[in-house]
């Protein structure tokens, strides 16, 4: 490998060091073992929805010679998406404004490559989903971390305003938020839109809003979901089916260009070129064929909410400080030990796997994925209780 390439890889790896260190620990290989309570990632621990499986089976039977040809945006798929979005949002999305992707990993890579020049700055909010920084870096841009309000985990608009410079090209906003579970309220989003509008005018070019809405249908307590894209015209909505269907290995998602986007033709052209460059971002043919049947399916969000309540009550009773999520798969909990990694390793010894805060810029905390099954929750609570009173500060 050339010197420059190895420096670049070193820089990228450095930005996900905490994650890599934890994910590659030899202990992690024990996660699938029977008896282990695995709360690390948003992976399924129960069988998939039978309707999902049969939709995929039907979609695998070819109906013409092009069934498995190279696919960009299948008209049937973009029509399904635009209809669904128009219904959910109460504004008209046209199929031409939808770009099918193979998930939000790809979606983010596409929008970053399409709109961000080397040397531009891209703001992301901390604590973040652990791959934002590396994706921004790999697009040649400079990541700018802005902390969320550390009490409410709402966006800190003053801090965002202070972080914007003439080089700012985009901001990534994730609501409902992984890992905090916060849904940003309309008032915050309205003020964010005003702030970005003013910054775009000052800079003489738009600051794009990339709205990562991976969990926009995983919302608890009957809450409404306000989309950041409804409050700012230069917005791109990124969605992945992997969360709502709990099938993260079956890669399908989309980018929706805001119906209010100025000059959408140029934006769509940039997305097309960027998608072609990142060849691996082409959406899978069979999943697009199945989309009409799977778009309306969802895991049981009520069941997920019950698991949130059971876990949160059990942990609170044991003395843990638990953050209350309004959506997503995740529960953030304060580690009784200052060193969250050491605490997580002590839990591993007892067969309970959680994600240390060091991996998502929240040292002193850990994250539990509520996609674990009931049995894992039941088995883990006595372990958490036994560890609650221990201290290693
Ligand atoms: C906030 C957020 N964005 C994007 C992704 C990536 O989603 P996918 O793997 O479906 O592309 C995830 C996955 O965990 C996520 O939590």
Image (tube, grey):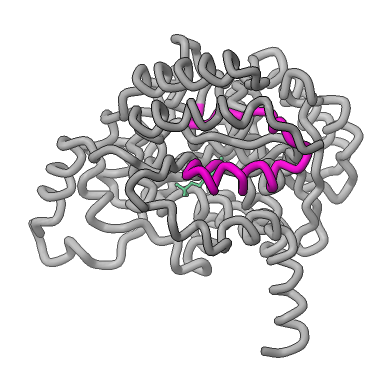
* Residue drawn 49% across the image and 22% down it: 311
Quick check: 169 above or below 279? above
* Residue drawn 80% across the image and 51% down it: 121
Q: Position of residue 124 (x, y in %)?
A: 73, 42
Total labels drawn: 0
Point out the image quarter for the C terminus: top right
* Residue 211 is inside the magenta segment: no
Task: Please state which of residues 13 and 346 is positioned toward the viewer in this rendering.
Answer: 346
In terms of image quadrants, where is residue 178? top right
* Residue drawn 83% across the image and 30% down it: 198
Does residue 60 appear anywhere in the picture?
yes
Q: Position of residue 69 (x, y in %)?
A: 24, 67
Task: Please state which of residues 29 and 240 is positioned toward the viewer in this rendering.
Answer: 29
Quick check: 12 above or below 214? below
| Side (left or right) of 277 relative to 250 | right
Outermost residue, top direction?
222
Does residue 126 appear anywhere in the picture?
no
* Residue 345 is inside the magenta segment: yes
Point out the image quarter for the N terminus: bottom right
Task: Please state which of residues 150 and 344 is positioned toward the viewer in this rendering.
Answer: 344
In terms of image quadrants, where is residue 136? bottom right
* Residue drawn 22% across the image and 55% down it: 286
Q: Which residues are magenta?
A: 328-354
| Side (left or right) of 259 relative to 49 | right
Q: Position of residue 290 (x, y in %)?
A: 21, 45
Q: Position of residue 93 (x, y in %)?
A: 43, 31
Outermost residue, bottom direction?
2
Task: Please state which of residues 165 and 3 is positioned toward the viewer in this rendering.
Answer: 3
């Amino acid at each position: 490998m050339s010197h420059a390439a190895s420096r670049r890889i070193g820089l990228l790896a450095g930005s996900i060091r905490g994650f890599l260190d934890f994910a590659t620990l030899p202990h992690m290989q024990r996660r699938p073992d029977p008896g282990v309570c695995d709360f690390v990632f948003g992976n399924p621990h129960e069988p998939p929805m039978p309707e999902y499986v049969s939709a995929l089976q039907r979609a695998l039977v070819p109906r013409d010679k092009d069934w498995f040809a190279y696919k960009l945006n299948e008209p049937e798929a973009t029509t399904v998406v635009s209809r669904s979005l128009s219904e959910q949002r109460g504004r008209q999305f046209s199929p031409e404004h939808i770009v099918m992707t193979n998930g939000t990993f790809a979606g983010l890579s596409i929008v970053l490559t399409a709109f961000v020049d080397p040397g531009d700055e891209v703001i992301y909010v901390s604590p973040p989903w652990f791959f934002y920084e590396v994706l921004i870096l790999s697009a040649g841009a400079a990541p700018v971390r802005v902390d969320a309000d550390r009490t409410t985990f709402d966006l800190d608009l003053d801090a965002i305003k202070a972080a914007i410079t003439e080089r700012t090209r985009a901001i990534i906003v994730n609501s409902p938020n992984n890992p905090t579970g916060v849904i940003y309220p309309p008032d915050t989003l309205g003020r964010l839109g005003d702030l970005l509008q003013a910054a775009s005018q000052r800079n003489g070019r738009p600051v794009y809003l990339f709205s990562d809405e991976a969990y926009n249908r995983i919302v608890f307590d009957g809450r409404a979901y306000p989309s950041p894209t409804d409050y700012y015209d230069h917005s791109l909505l990124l969605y992945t089916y992997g969360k709502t269907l709990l099938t993260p290995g079956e890669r399908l998602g989309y980018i929706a260009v805001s119906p209010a986007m100025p000059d959408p033709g140029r934006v769509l052209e940039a997305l097309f070129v960027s998608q072609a460059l990142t060849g691996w971002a082409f959406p899978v043919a069979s999943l697009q064929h199945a989309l009409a049947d799977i778009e309306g399916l969802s895991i049981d969000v009520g069941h997920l909410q019950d698991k949130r309540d059971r876990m949160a009550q059990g942990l609170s009773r044991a003395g843990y400080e638990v953050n209350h999520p309004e959506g997503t798969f995740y529960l953030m909990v304060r580690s009784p030990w200052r060193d969250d990694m050491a605490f997580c390793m002590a839990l591993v010894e007892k067969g309970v796997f959680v994600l240390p805060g060091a991996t998502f810029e929240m040292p002193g905390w850990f994250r539990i994925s509520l996609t674990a099954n009931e049995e894992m929750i039941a088995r883990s609570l006595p372990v958490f209780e036994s560890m609650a009173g221990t201290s290693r500060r």
